[in-house]
Image: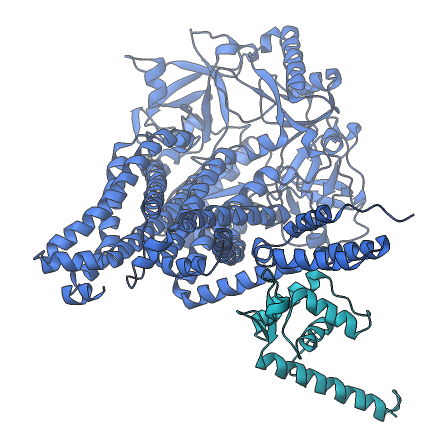
Amino acid sequence: MAPVLPPESGIVWLYHQFLFLYPAEFRNEYRRELCLAFKDEWQEKHSRIGRLFVWLRAIFGILYHAPKEHWHMIVHDFRYAFRILRKDWSFTLAAIAILALGIGATTLVFSLANGLLLRPLPYPESSRIVSVQEDSPVEPNEDGHINFLNYLDIRPRVTLLEDIGLYGGGGGLIRGEGPAEQVQSTLVTDGVFSVLRVAPLLGRTFTPAENMPNGPKVVILGEGLWRRRYGSDPKILGKVLDIDDSRWTVIGVMPANFYFPDRSQLWLPLQADPRTSFRTDYFLRAIGRLKPGVSINQASAELESLLEQIHRENPAANNGWIALVAPIREHMVGTYRKGLITLLVAVGLLLLIACANVSNLLLVKASARGREIAVRTALGATRRRIVRQLLSESAILGVAGALLGILLAKLGVPALLALVPTALPQWMNFSLDQRVLGFATGIALLAICVFGMVPAWGVSKTDLTSVLKEAGRGGSSSMRQRLLRNGLVIGEVALSVILLAAAGLMIRSFAALRLQNLGFNPENILTLSVDYPQSRYPDGPASRAMVDRLRQEVSAIPGVASAAFSSGVPLDDGWGRIFTIEGRPVALKEMRAINHIVVTPGYFQTLGIPILQGRDFTAPDFDAPHVVLVGESFAKRYWPGETALGKRIRFGPPANDEPWNTVVGVVADYKHGTLRGPDRSNVYLPYQKDVTPSSLLIRTARDPMQLAQTVKSRISGFDRDIAVGPALTLDQIIDRVSWQDRFLTVLIASFAFIALALAAVGLYAIISYTVALGTHEIGIRVALGASASNVRTLILRQGLALSGTGLLIGIGAAFVLARLLRAQLYETSPLDPATYVTVPIVLILVTVLAVFLPTRRATRVDPVIALRHD
Amino acid sequence: MRPFILSRDTFHILVALADSDRHGYSIMQEIAQRTGGEVRLSPSTLYSAIKRLLEQGFIEELAERPDPAHDDERRRYYRLTKAGRRAAVQEAAHLEKLLSDARATGLVRKRV
């Protein structure tokens, strides 16, 4: 049966509908012809089969040719765009460079965010891994520690976690088969491996029995260490290694990318003894794995109730601390997150400025091309076509900018990491992966839309007659275009003011951090960590004698002014203890911590810390027990209006009943625990036993690094088995503990500098264009007797009006946004007056500079030539 | 070397316009007739080719109507330009050369 076909007029109408698949231009040009030809063919056939063939051929023809016409058009548009861009290559290069800066900087910061926040951690189902921690509600320290005995009680009782693993820092000094080597090592329980779910490359991980006190001495190596030090020895399992002065049997090798917690290459079983542990000691951390479907909050609530239960069972040890669970990434990313978010916001502003800038350049150019566009419109180009033409140019610029930007980001990552003076955890990987590339592509597309649409929109409504009437002046400027251009420049200025203010605040904060009075003179101080074999120097007189000898050896080196040992390096010492003042008992819950600093003779002299009252430690103090020195603020706080000398304090929870210590001196305060933020008070103890001070501090008469080698060889000459860590000056340590501040400051200041430069380019472009347009007007003014300075003032006023408006908006926005920076600022108010005074001055200077060149051109206008323009 | 690469359809269109100016449907008819119905262009094929030929300058659109008797004012008429004629002639010569090569090798039978 022949198919039923619609009547003739209907079929032509239907055919006509298919023509909408063609580009509008083609359709408008040939629609009538196509319909006529189709109708003729249709009428010529009388059979239904014949007409069916005509219909099918016509429709397939459209389906085949319409996409081709679209493609031809795109190719044509792009060819044309290339020609236009090549003709004005200085503009093209400038636009590409600006976009590359914007896209490159954004991609760069995103790759940091990706490495820190987005890239999955190298453990299966890592989103279920959590840190399990306790914290003091009185003095939150966010250290993420957990007490060992509490952990022992929690592990069997917890129901919402699959398992809990405990870990803490270890020694890791390997001897034998080559030089002694300090390897980053971690003490772990069997739970760590079951929580992380990483199988060993060779052998096995720890068993619960191996975590018992005095359990078997077994060790697990990292793949890197196994390969480097033991040549990937396949028979490594069962081998006995000399680590930290005892013998350990290798039972496993972990795979290549396993560095838990951050750069570890050696795992020893944590074999703490519950009988000698206290419930108030915090130096271990824990991880757990949530059971499927369990939320962080549920797990936190369970942990909290378990801890309360433990406190009820052990009232003497109830310190009132709370337990909580946090995603492991949050714990590991820690302080980086806030800085990173600040950077993302800053770089987002920079990208916007770059887009506005290119937008403006395109708009100025497009306005100058008004005649060309008007002529094309007159010749039949549709508005859509013109817009598409302009968008093709934008797309070429955008793609070129994006490619160059990605290249910049790729080069930028290692350059940025060079600013980081410490070794970052291995899991932080900042390479450009698919996510970063996808992001860069998205940003580029967004940028193309933003900077491409604005000029297209501004130009497409060009009024034909008015443009053509302005023959010979080479450009036109409708009200709408002028508003757009001015708006863009004002926006650019405002955004760069925000960045400038942010940079100003960061610089002020960094200066406050670095120029603060530390309470000691960090210049010419060398620090080294010293690790010695405990079997040879057992705790007590033997290690005391060794430390004394070592100090004398080092002090005798020419160029060394004084030397001392302490239990921690200033500015990077987290060791604190809770304390009680005699006669003023405090509940365990209310107890605060001090910096517990164990020192040898010469400590205060080496750091240059004056003794304010009483005396320094003397030789007998190191034998006769129980004297301490305290910091000034500690003395003032606890014995206001009276002397601290002769008063007694003791450490640890009341239940421990530790001996009382008499204060024999008060020393000036200095920053010991941390460079940033509030520090605990300092209390000093003479080295006797228990805590062997392992940080060697040396004040030198000249560049301390020059002495580093001599000191090291003197120590190994004393005893080859004493391992010496890397030598660092105190200045380097300050660099290390403040690197995040420096990193943020450098980046935000660079962004602000680029932003300012872009805003200046924007101002320059628009003022030049206005001057070029106004040549005629300026000519008339000059002919009527206006002086060069009149003309200069006129133009300068225009520039200042634009940047002044931007400045006001920007300062207003900065006032609001600066609050976001508060967490990054050190002793600097987000409304720091100096910053808000400096920024406008800088901006006005830059405006004058940007406007100066076009002004010079304007004042050179010869009225005769200018008027001949018509 | 081939100076021009004309597609089969394009060549047919140029040939159809060789002896008289025509409008679109007339070109389609002429080609169908000449080839005994073997080559039938759809309107889309025709006008895509016409657009290209106009851009290349091989054909031109007529301002005046060539045949007032059969004039249909809605239709556009096309004429072969000098360049178009040259292109068609070269293409034909090329095809002829190709054919004689084929004959010389005995691939195709010689014309009697």
Front residue of A15/A443: it is A15
Front residue of A267/A639: it is A267
Would residue A138 be found to the left or right of residue A809 on screen?
right
Q: Is residue A371 above or below residue A120?
A: below
- Decide if residue A416 is in sight here: no
Query: Residue furthest toward the right?
Result: A1
The chain coloured blue is A
What's the colour of chain B in the image?
cyan
Could you tell me how many numbered marks the image carries?
0
Residue sitting at 74 percent across and 45 percent down? A255
Would residue A404 be found to the left or right of residue A219 on screen?
left
Query: Residue furthest toward the left?
Result: A785
Q: Which quarter of the picture shows residue A263?
A: top right
Front residue of A21/A795: it is A21
Residue B53 percent location from the top left of the image: 61, 71
Residue sitting at 45 percent across and 46 percent down? A351
Residue sitting at 69 percent across and 75 percent down? B16
Residue B20 percent location from the top left of the image: 65, 76
Residue A311 percent location from the top left of the image: 62, 9
- Decide if residue A484 is in sight here: yes
Quadrant where the image shows the C terminus of chain A: bottom left
Would residue A152 be found to the left or right of residue A103 on screen?
right
Q: Which quarter of the picture shows residue A309?
A: top right
Q: How is the image coloured?
A: by chain
Q: Is residue A244 above or below residue B40?
A: above
Residue A138 percent location from the top left of the image: 48, 15
Q: Is residue B80 above or below residue A409?
A: below
